[in-house]
């Protein structure tokens, strides 16, 4: 929970106006993120906002991701409602009936969005945590594959305990959308064999990977070059549906 002493009184009064829009736990999350957004000195990402509010060691970042996932319709409803309130104020003071009616309509629409939005399907806390973990795994694999010259090296240097074999590295990298990185690592392995930097046959290569030269090599030529079996299709791209 964000220490109340860290929030200026004027800001606390302003944020308190949003209490009807959130439950008590969600309001605390909203308050912490709002304070972090103002106090952040670096990029205003989720982690940057938690750092700015001094909550990086108190809250897990999935709490903020869950807030944005679950409260997205409430936030839109609040925005529409605030715009409607502004137009009502202008319509009463100009006066201008068109603005007044438009403001009333937007205010009603904002309330409806908030009410209906609570029933909309959204990301759960476990789902948000899994998505954050998968994003971290993808960054780790991509960084490792950018520097590796073989899939064996990817397995050895990635530091992921569940990644034990080169074929697992290929499967996970394919599932995480790192097709180009797979191709680059395999090309480096073939280049090392051709240049004699490693002994022939000592570098792991998937059966479906074309070993020819030019445009027939790699994913692009895997289907034309005869194809592998097992978990992968004989086409150029591995069959994810068969995994």
Image: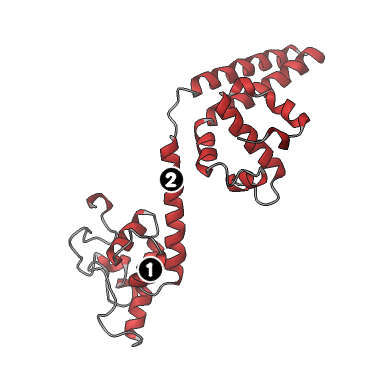
The quarter holding residue 224 reads bottom left
Check the image and name the residue furthest to the left.
Answer: 229
The quadrant where residue 168 appears? bottom left
Q: To which quarter of the image does residue 173 belong?
A: bottom left
Q: Secondary structure at mark 1?
A: helix
Horizontally, residue 216 falls left or right of residue 37, namely left
Q: Residue at x 24, y 60 (%)?
A: 235
At 67% from the left and 52% from the top, the residue drawn is 42
Residue 95 in view here: no
236 vs 123, left or right, is: left
**Residue at position x 41%, y 72% from top?**
148
Between 183 and 236, the residue placed more toward the observer is 183
Q: Residues within 10 Å of mark 2 (few under 14, many from 20)?
A: some
**Colouring method of the image:** secondary structure
Whole-percent x, y for residue 237 in the image:
29, 59
Q: Residues within 10 Å of mark 1 (few under 14, many from 20)?
A: many
Q: Is residue 133 above or below residue 153?
A: above
Label 1 close to label 2 by CB (< 8 Å): no
Name the mark on residue 60: none
Q: Secondary structure at mark 2?
A: helix
- Residue 118 located left or right of residue 92: left
On screen, residue 172 above or below 83: below
Residue 208 pos. (x, y %): 24, 66
* Residue 234 seen from this side: yes
CA gap between label 1 and label 2 equals: 22 Å
Q: Which residue is mark 2?
A: 131
Q: Nearer the viewer, residue 89 or 49?
A: 49
Outermost residue, right direction?
A: 94
Q: How many marks?
A: 2
Residue tagged 1:
154
In this picture, is 114 found above or below 146?
A: above
Where residue 33 appears, as percent x and y from the top left, is: 63, 38
């Amino acid at each position: 929970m964000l220490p109340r002493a860290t929030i200026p009184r004027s800001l606390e009064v302003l944020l308190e106006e949003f209490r009807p829009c959130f439950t008590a736990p969600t309001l605390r999350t909203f308050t912490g993120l709002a304070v972090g957004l103002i106090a952040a000195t670096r990029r205003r990402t989720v982690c940057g906002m938690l750092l700015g509010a001094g909550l990086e060691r108190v809250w897990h970042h999935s709490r903020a991701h869950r807030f944005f996932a679950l409260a997205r319709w409430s936030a839109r409803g609040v925005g529409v409602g605030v715009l409607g309130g502004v137009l009502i104020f202008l319509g009463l003071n100009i006066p201008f009936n068109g603005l007044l009616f438009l403001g009333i309509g937007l205010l009603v629409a904002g309330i409806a969005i908030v009410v209906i939005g609570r029933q909309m399907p959204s990301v759960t806390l476990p789902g948000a945590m899994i998505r954050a973990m998968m994003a971290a795994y993808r960054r780790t694999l991509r960084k490792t594959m950018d520097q590796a010259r073989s899939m064996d090296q990817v397995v050895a240097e990635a530091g992921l305990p569940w990644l034990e074999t080169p074929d697992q590295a290929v499967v996970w990298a394919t599932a995480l959308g790192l097709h180009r990185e797979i191709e680059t690592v395999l090309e480096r392995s073939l280049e090392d064999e051709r240049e004699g930097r490693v002994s022939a046959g000592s570098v792991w290569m998937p059966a479906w990977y074309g070993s020819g030269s030019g445009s027939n090599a790699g994913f692009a030529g895997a289907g034309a070059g005869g194809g592998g079996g097992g978990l992968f299709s004989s086409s150029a791209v591995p069959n994810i549906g068969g995994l």
